[in-house]
Structures are given as C-alpha cells and as structure tokens.
Amino acid sequence: MRCFDIHCHLLTLSHPGFASIIQTFRSRPRELITTQLASFEYLAASMLNRGGEKLRNIISVMDNDCGDILALMEDDLAGHFIRSGEESGADNPPVPLLSDGRFDFGSFSCDTLVLTPLLIDFSSLQALPPDTWYHRVPRKPIATQILDVLYGIRQYRRERPEGKLEVYPFLGINPSRYTPASMHELLERWFGEYQRHAEVCKDRFLRAADLASEEDLMRAGLFVGIKLYPPLGVDPWPDEPAARETLEVLYSFAERLRIPITTHCDDGGFRVVPMEQALAYTDPERYRPVLERHPDLVLNFAHFGTRYLHSFRGMEQKEWRSSIIAMITEWPNIYTDISFIACDPPLYAALNELLATLPDDDAERLASRIMFGSDFPVNLLKVRSYLDYWRIFADASIDDGLKMNMVVHNPARFLWGQCMQHAPA
C-alpha cells in the first residue's frame, strides 16, 4: 500500500528567483513589514534564533542536487539523522517512521511513499530588476529546473533500486509566458502520453534508471500534474481576452485528460507582484468562474487557504478556508492539502473541531478530499526536520479513518481517481 506526501519540492539553491524576491521587498518595504509581522513566529525566528539555525538547515538541504535531496528525505524518515542527548537538542529524539522496510502509522502501515514534487516557474514577467550593478533580471528558465528534477529521479532510481520512494513531479507553469498555441505545444510535449493510472506511472518511474539521454528522460512521461503559483503573477481567470484564451487551453486540456492541478493557496510564499494583486489571484473564489466552465477539473487548493494576514491597509481580510469547503461541496474533484500548516500540532485538533461543526454531509466530503502534504523543504522554516513533520502527523489525535484518508486514499483519488487498498499493520 502507498502513502503520499502530495505537496513537497525538490528545490536546489539555483531554482528560486532570490534576486527578484529580494528586490520586491526592497521596492515595497511596507509589504515586507506587514509580511514579517503576520508570520513573525517563523520568518523572523528562522533568521534570528540560534544563529539562523532554521535558515541554515534549509540551505543544507537545498545545497544538494535533486537526487541527493530524495535520498536525504528517505534517510531522514529512517532515522539516519537522529542524534541523542544534547546533540539532538531534545530529550526524546523522534521515532523513525520508516523501519523494516515499512512506513509505520501505528494502526496501519505502508510499503511505499509517493512524493509529488511541485516545480514552480520562477521566470515571472513581472519580476523586478535588482537595483545593483548587474541590473538584469535572472531568467530562471523552467527547462533547467525540469532537467534537474528528471536527472534527480534517474539518479535516485540508479543508486537506490530498492528505495522506498516513488516520485511523480508536477510541472510548474506560468501561463502569462505563453500564447494559446505555445501553451498547447507545451502541454502536448509534457502530457501528450499522459495516463491517469497508478501502475502506468509506477512503470515509467521504475524505468527511469535505464534512460540514458536527456531526450529519453523528457519523453518518459514522468510528469503527472500541473502546478500554478499566483503570487508570481498567475491570474487564474484574467480579464484580458488573449490571456484568458491561454488559460482556457490549459484548463480544457487538463479537464479532458483529468490531469490534477495544484494551486498555491495561502497569503504567504514567494511573491514578486504587489501584495494586493497576489491576494486577488490567490483567492480561491478567483477559480469559481473556472469551475463553472470546467466542472470536472481536478484541482487542489494547497495549504487549506490559510490566512496569516488578517488586515491589510486597514481592510479586514476575508477567510479563504470556507470558500474551499464550499467548492468541495459543489464540485466533485476539488481537494485541499495541509502542507506547511501542519508544522504545528494544534492544526489537527483544529481540524477535528472544524469537522465537528460542519453539517454531516459537508464534513464527510471534506474528510474525503483533504490530503497530507509537507511543503518540504520550505516547512523547515517552522519544523526541525522532514521526520519531525511526519511524526506530528503520525502521532496526531485524529481518527484513524481520517488519517488514512489524508495520507492514503484521498491523494490516490486526486492523482489517479482510485483508492488504495488497506493493508494491515
């Protein structure tokens, strides 16, 4: 049986557009202050506490290539980084999740962990040039990131043929960089042989070790979904006709083949557009006209619509979570994930309370559409390790049926339209 981390990343230091993000903050200092105040407990702490230990921890991950990051994640879950006593900084080191070849959740276990690393197209047309001598915006082509991830998958398969991970990446797309024709060409290139079937995906992943050339890797059909990132200038439903037509090509293609889409949905993250614009694009209600035209679209609102910013420029900010729940009740293929926000153990108690307050039908629908995700390595801003994040979930006081839904059944439906069969612990 497979368990899933439906939202993680294979980010190296070369992938994000750090210069553009820094310039965004420099050119909009009030937004920087607002963001820091809204997320002070983890943004400031990552830079200040213990000599910036959390930030250094993230860099120690991102300084690897993609194949080594996959090995690091697997080794972490197996307890290879656990140190005891003063070295660990904790009296009770975490218990490994992976032991004797299985991922142990107490009441059930799994023999494989599926990762869906989400690529992000950082090459935004709205990125600001740095106010430095070299005042040229770094291009950050998504093609480089694609090759890094595909080579990483091949490396992992070659070095760990008996490894416990299956890796199925999502292609990051910034539609503003495409015309309708070039969008269709892009989708045909990466999803022309797409099949929404678990065993087809597994077979392609297993064969990655044997692929010799770059062209073979690109033709292997390893991508299983699409990632959209509104704070980098992705408007899900633009007013301008040509831009709208480009999005229609994407949505129609994805709806026809049932390709799952994950969209960023909290008010934090990497941002290069003005905050007001980012908030408008990220608001799940922005997808309502999309879903009215494409009701069978398979769509995941990441981070469960979490709001850190409760007021902006004197205006109270509306809550997004209720919009996501409403869409889950209205459309058959709307999902959400708890990536990053589950760094805090109280999240699970709050989830129990939320389900208890909803009407029975709505609670049942939410319980069948909410998925586990980590946002690794970004979640290291708040939590010490990938293992710690998983242990918070494994030890959470939520119903075992809900736990299995979140980590097994719901992500399997999201990816492949089918549940995984239960296997006893």
Image (tube, grey):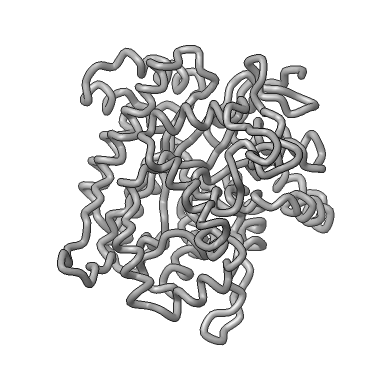
Residue reaching furthest to the front: 86
188, 412: nearer the viewer: 412
Judge whether 231 appears above or below 252 on screen: below
Q: Position of residue 229 (x, y in %)?
A: 41, 55
Q: Residue at the spot x=61%, y=48% of the render?
A: 383
Q: Indicate the position of residue 153 as horizontal and vertical percent values.
A: 38, 26
Q: Quadrant of the N terminus?
A: top right
Residue at horizontal 49%, vertical 24%?
166
Quadrant holding the C terminus: top right
Point 66% across, 44% down: residue: 89
Q: Is residue 377 visible?
A: yes
Q: Quadrant of residue 410?
A: top right
Residue 174 in sight here: no
The quarter of the picture where residue 397 lies is: top right
Q: Nearer the viewer, residue 284 or 148?
A: 148
- The correct choice, above or below, for 51 with respect to 239 in the image is above
31 with respect to 123 (left or right) = right
Q: Which residue is situated farthest in the bottom direction here?
A: 314
Q: How many marks?
A: 0
Q: Could you say where residue 72 lies in the image, as x and y percent from the top left?
A: 49, 30
Quadrant in the rendering for residue 323 = bottom right
Is residue 297 found left or right of 394 in the rendered image? left
Q: Is 207 placed above or below 353 here?
A: above
Residue lying at 71% horizontally and 25% vertically, measured from the top left: 104
**Is 311 placed above or below 420 here?**
below
What percent of the width, then of the height, locates residue 277?
Answer: 41, 72
